[in-house]
Image (tube, rainbow, N blue to C red):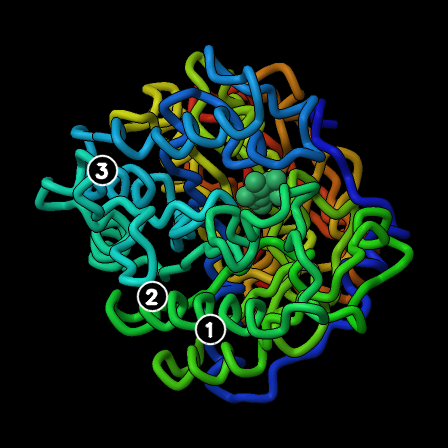
Amino acid sequence: MLCCLPLLSTAQHHNVSAGYVPPSDPLVQQNLAEWQDLKFGLFMHWGTYSQWGIVESWSLCPEDEGWTVRRGPHAENYFDYVKAYENLQTTFNPVLFNPEKWAEAAKQAGMKYVVFTTKHHDGFAMFDTKYSDYKITDPKTPFSKHPKANVAKEVFSAFRTDGFKIGAYFSKPDWHADDYWWPYFPPKDRNVNYDPVNYPERWENFKNFTYNQIEELMTSYGKMDILWLDGGWVRPFATIDTTVEWQRTIKVEQDIDMARIAKMARGHQPGLLVVDRTVPGEFENYVTPEQQVPSEPLDIPWESCLTMGNSWSYVPNDTYKPARQIIHTLVKIVSRGGNYLLNIGPSPEGDWDPDAYDRLKAVGEWMAINGEGIYSTRTIEPYAQDNIYYTQHKNGQTSYAFLLSGSDSDAIQLPSTIQLALPNGTPVKRVEILGLGKVKFKIKENTLEITVPDSVRTHADLHYAAVIKLSH
Ligand code: GLC
């Protein structure tokens, strides 16, 4: 077992799966099926907050004081803190920004799609919006002079060139927008700070602002595959699930009119996946358990988003998970039918911590040999047996058993005989250990018995997870 990887219990599964509505648009269905084959994607949280090495956005939110810790000499009072935080715009200058380098490292690691924070809850746009001057391309931001100032555009085009599917993370709440946190009142919590019922015009303005910014992203940034919308408290009352604790705290209805947004977005980007996360219904094309992995397969499309370090945002000297843990997590997720969106937070200078490159390189070396058991696979019973995890290729002609190393060791020692459970009557023509070649086997009832030669058992090339391929 992996340490420190929270699992979703069956009861929680029920919550993530409840209310799922499969898309009816054939282009969305096709994009979703393609996306499910990709399995492994890169998430990036990047904004001016990286300069203070603090959690993204949340220190602005009064209810979240405690775990977010305000930084520096700016915390005398809330309004000065907000000023100082927003003033980070005037020093944000990530001159090492080189998205081709990121795309190259992610590609080599076997990642196939990217989701990038175009705007987090703090409202700072990492793209060239004309609806706000709180943005990377505003003259107040030093990086605006740089030829790659429109960073979202540069990230998307570098990754697209490397064959990635492209996802825009966009926060529905915007704590900088006067129509969301109206300065007439102090903000109390993450929600809109006035009641849209009493101030319908103001809310209408906010809806239009959100619609317009999303339209910019859908029209000026090339082909987009995923619109990943965060801030699930911005939702109609009717969608609140009162069995979920945090949803019970939503006191104000914040209907952003997803139908209108999705129609516009798909008008520009046919087949676009819309992920209005945690809001079950037709605009949540897949579900997104966060920092958690379901403990068994889910029968709907899903993606776990997990951090490589301890934070979504860049924190100096953060501890990055070892390659072994990343690979074990990938295997578990894929054996349960999900995708793995792995987050790296870029630094204020515009690069990743060297440890992040190091982990991706090790993952890539493993994927180069074993990736065929990951991509385009489906779940297969028994999914897992002790430390062995199973997948099958969607063409039904091969299946794979992953034997994980111990949770604190990279090396693998295979036993001289391996027994795998087989579904009734499965024909097996050939058995191979990926990277090392064919091995002898016998079938006894529903058990495949593999004989592992001594030269293979402790082979130096075996680490993290040995993959046994069965051809049917
Ligand atoms: C959590 C964080 C949020 C982050 C998100 C990514 O909800 O609070 O800041 O963007 O996870 O999934």
Alpha carbon separation for disc pair 3 and 1 = 25 Å
> Tag 2: residue type?
Leu
What residue sits right under mark 3 in the picture? 141
Which is closer to the viewer, label 1 or label 2?
1
Which residue of the protein is positioned furthest toward the front in this rendering? Answer: 184
CA neighbours of label 1 inside 10 A, class few (<14), some (14 to 19), many (20+): some
Disc 1 to disc 2, how far (Cα)?
14 Å
The residue type indicated by label 1 comes to Asn
Residue sitting at 63 percent across and 15 percent down? 408
Label 3 or label 2, whichever lies nearer to me, is 3
Q: Which residue is mark 1?
A: 208
Q: Are marks 3 and 1 in contact (CB under 8 Å)?
A: no
Q: Is residue 452 left or right of residue 244?
A: left
x%, y% of residue 264? 43, 82
Q: Residues within 10 Å of mark 3 (few under 14, many from 20)?
A: many
Screen quadrant of the N terminus: top right
In terms of image quadrants, where is residue 67? top right
| Mark 3 / mark 1, whichever is N-terminal | 3
Q: Is residue 381 above or below residue 263?
A: above
Q: Residue at x 91, y 56 (%)?
A: 243
Q: Out of 96 and 442, give the one closest to the viewer.
A: 96
Which residue is under mark 2? 217
Residue 223 position within the rendered picture, expressed as x and y whole percent measured from the top left: 29, 71
Residue depicted at 78% across the width and 55% down the height = 250
Under circle 2, the secondary element is helix
